[in-house]
Amino acid sequence: MAHKNDSKADAKKNAVKKGASPITSPLSDSDRDVTGRVLQDTLLDLIDLHLVAKQAHWNVVGKFFRDVHLQLDELVSAARGFADDVAERAVTIGVSPDGRAATVAKGSGVPEFPADWSTDREVIEAIVEALGEVVTRLRKRIDETDKTDLITQDLLISVASELEKSHWMWQAQLA
Ligand SMILES: [Fe+2]
């Protein structure tokens, strides 16, 4: 007769050992650790960037509402896509990504976005600041991955390239 505790014991047996990766890494342990941390930090910034852009998308008001509202959704899609690419690179090198809300709140480097309505100009200024910060942090990480993993570095370069382009397009509206 099956015992009540059997399923518990089975679940325990089948659980992934905490701290041990079921995915083999193409990198040495130390390169994997440095690269994994860089990817994790980048993931938090990108998730937060997408949340801030959505918050702004909903709360923007003003003469240029429509342009800003639509441009924000382009940023949301880009940031979400990049977050997925970065998280999946972490998995590929054997590192478990952590994109939970509490982890994002603690670790993101994106400046806090205010609650309530924002004018189109306030939103543009906040997004310029957020993108500038994310790109500055990314550029440091591009340097950090130079000796640990060129494939991750290549991914970070492509993300930075797109975000820098977006940074220009947001800044252009403040002239
Ligand atoms: Fe929408």
Image (cartoon, helix red, strand yellow):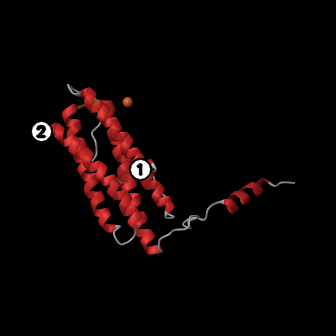
Which disc number belongs to residue 83?
1
| Mark linked to residue 175 | 2
Circle 2: residue type: Ala
- Is residue 82 depicted above or below 32 in this figure? above
Evaluate whether residue 109 shows in this view.
no
- Please report the residue visible at 32 percent of the width from the left and 68 percent of the height from the top: 144
Q: Identify residue type, mark 1.
A: Ala
- Rendered location of residue 129, percent (x, y): 22, 47
Residue at 29% in and 49% down: 163
Instruction: Please state the horizontal and vertical placement of residue 84, each as a whole percent of the image.
Output: 45, 50
Please name whichever residue, 156 or 2, is drawn nearer the observer in this view of the structure. 156
Residue positioned 50% across, 69% down in the render: 26
SS at badge 1: helix
Instruction: Say which element carries label 2.
Output: loop
Q: Is residue 162 above or below residue 56?
A: below
Q: Residue at x 70, y 62 (%)?
A: 13
Picture quadrant where residue 148 is located: bottom left
